Image (cartoon, rainbow, N blue to C red):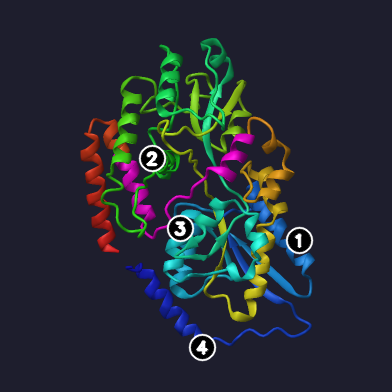
């Protein structure tokens, strides 16, 4: 598989360090010094939690390990987290542990910027994590990352509007098909209210994150198992089916191709396809809402839901003397307690079953839907070095379809552009 250019730079940097660096050796009196980078600053609740966890880690392992945290905001300029990490990969300046977005695990693993960590965790420990967390952290058969939080997508609905229309909501045992969802949306659509809002104006990661489960539901994907081939997948039958339905929903006026902000919260849409962050937004509005599971494509399809979030990885710069400590730090940052507190900090679902058990909100309606999905139907996005290209082309094709382009032509164009970009790398 072709490697990204910065993998070459990374290899050179590591080789240089191997010949010039003095190996770390801790005396009996001195703790092993560890470094960790995270993508949130203390200006956010999540960032404050990271700082608190590192402080607690140092207290628990006083005299054995000591971690120093660096917090970098994910800004869009050259000072942003992703840019800092990529620069560190090229110059050999990575910390021992750093946070990695789940969808970039393959890129960092393929570039040998991170190393496998499974040997440091017991089978019992790993079994407690959501299967989707293990999926997104595994590349070419080896586990590289673990996370404290996860995410999910479902159908939020206005209970008052459903009751007025005589519509019974779907359940995890009986999810709606797309035809049933469309039928309900048609009943709920009025002159001043769409049946559903689905972020159809998304030109970013949102598009594939929300709708990929409906491709998986049909037993397909957007890329082959080799992690490279898009032909027959990104433009395959399942994608044609999905985009045809999306176009139909917009053309019939059941969903807006350019939805207004907070249209569901303001009563301008009866349903919303949205993520596990939505309850935090809904708390700001006066709305009687419920949550239904992700729909399936048709009655012959499998229930599949979205998932994935930020994780912790051990860098290739972590020396052998520090690896046990780095693994212990990852274990601490992804514990059930950390997951429970992460929910309190940013409302995101935890990554572990035992953490779900400890959070009352996920064991009763409506959030029990997300609990069920993450432990039963969640499937990770493709773990591929080309994922970002797939995501971009998915979103572009959706916009092309919604602005009048033929579905098949839009998807064929997406594959052509993907192939062009993949060849460059």
Q: Secondary structure at mark 2?
A: loop
Q: How far from the left and from the top, in percent, is residue 108?
A: 45, 65
User: What numbered label is drawn on residue 56?
Assistant: 1
**Mark 4 nearby-residue class (10 Å; few <14, some 14–19, many ≥20):** few
Q: Which residue is mark 3?
A: 104
Q: Work out which quarter of the rendered image holds the C terminus and state it.
A: bottom left
- Residue sitting at x 31%, y 42%: 396
Q: Nearer the viewer, mark 1 or mark 2?
A: 2
Dominant secondary structure (helix, strand or loop) of the stretch shown in magenta: helix
Viewer-proximal residue, 295 or 338? 295
Q: Nearer the viewer, mark 4 or mark 3?
A: 3
**Mark 2 nearby-residue class (10 Å; few <14, some 14–19, many ≥20):** many
How far apart, in angstroms, are the residues tagged by discs 3 and 2?
A: 25 Å
Are the residues flagged by discs 1 and 4 in contact, CB closer than 8 Å?
A: no
Q: Secondary structure at mark 1?
A: helix
**Mark 1 nearby-residue class (10 Å; few <14, some 14–19, many ≥20):** few
Left or right: 37 in relation to 306: right
Q: Nearer the viewer, mark 3 or mark 2?
A: 2
Q: What range is drawn magenta here?
A: 368-397
Determine if residue 84 is in view.
Answer: no
């Amino acid at each position: 598989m072709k490697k990204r250019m910065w993998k070459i730079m990374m290899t050179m940097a590591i080789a240089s360090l191997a010949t010039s660096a003095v190996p770390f050796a801790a005396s009996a009196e001195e703790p092993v010094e560890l470094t960790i980078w995270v993508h949130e600053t203390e200006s956010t609740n999540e960032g404050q939690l990271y700082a608190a966890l590192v402080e607690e880690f140092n207290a628990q392992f006083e005299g054995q390990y000591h971690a120093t945290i660096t917090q970098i905001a994910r800004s869009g300029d050259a000072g942003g987290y992703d840019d800092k990490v990529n620069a560190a990969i090229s110059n050999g300046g990575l910390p021992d542990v750093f946070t990695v977005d789940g969808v970039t695990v393959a890129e960092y693993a393929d570039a040998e910027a991170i190393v496998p960590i499974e040997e440091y965790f017991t089978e019992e420990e790993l079994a407690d994590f959501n299967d989707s967390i293990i999926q997104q952290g595994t590349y070419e058969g080896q586990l590289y990352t673990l996370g404290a939080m996860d995410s999910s997508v479902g159908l939020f609905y206005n209970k008052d509007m459903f009751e007025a229309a005589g519509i019974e909501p779907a359940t995890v045992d009986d999810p709606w098909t797309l035809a049933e969802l469309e039928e309900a949306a048609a009943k709920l659509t009025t002159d001043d209210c769409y049946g559903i809002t689905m972020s159809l104006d998304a030109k970013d990661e949102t598009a594939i994150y929300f709708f990929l489960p409906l491709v998986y539901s049909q037993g397909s994907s957007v890329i082959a198992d080799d992690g490279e081939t898009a032909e027959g997948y990104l433009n395959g039958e399942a994608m044609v089916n999905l985009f045809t339905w999306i176009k139909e929903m917009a053309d019939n006026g059941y969903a807006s191709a350019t939805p207004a902000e907070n249209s569901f919260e303001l009563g301008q849409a009866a349903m919303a396809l949205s993520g596990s962050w939505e309850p935090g937004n809904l708390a700001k509005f006066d709305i009687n809402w419920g949550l239904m599971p992700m729909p399936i494509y048709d009655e012959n399809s499998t229930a599949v839901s979205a998932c994935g979030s930020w994780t912790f990885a051990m860098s290739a710069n972590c020396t052998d003397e520090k690896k046990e400590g780095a693994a212990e730090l990852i274990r601490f940052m992804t514990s059930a307690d950390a997951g429970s507190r992460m929910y309190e900090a940013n409302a995101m679902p935890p990554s572990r079953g035992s953490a779900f058990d400890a959070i009352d909100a996920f064991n009763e309606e409506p959030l029990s839907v997300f609990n069920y999905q993450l432990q039963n139907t969640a499937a990770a996005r493709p773990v591929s070095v080309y994922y970002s290209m797939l995501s971009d082309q998915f979103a572009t094709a959706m916009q092309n379809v919604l602005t009048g382009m033929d579905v098949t032509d839009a998807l064929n164009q997406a594959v052509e552009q993907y192939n062009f970009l993949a060849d460059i790398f």
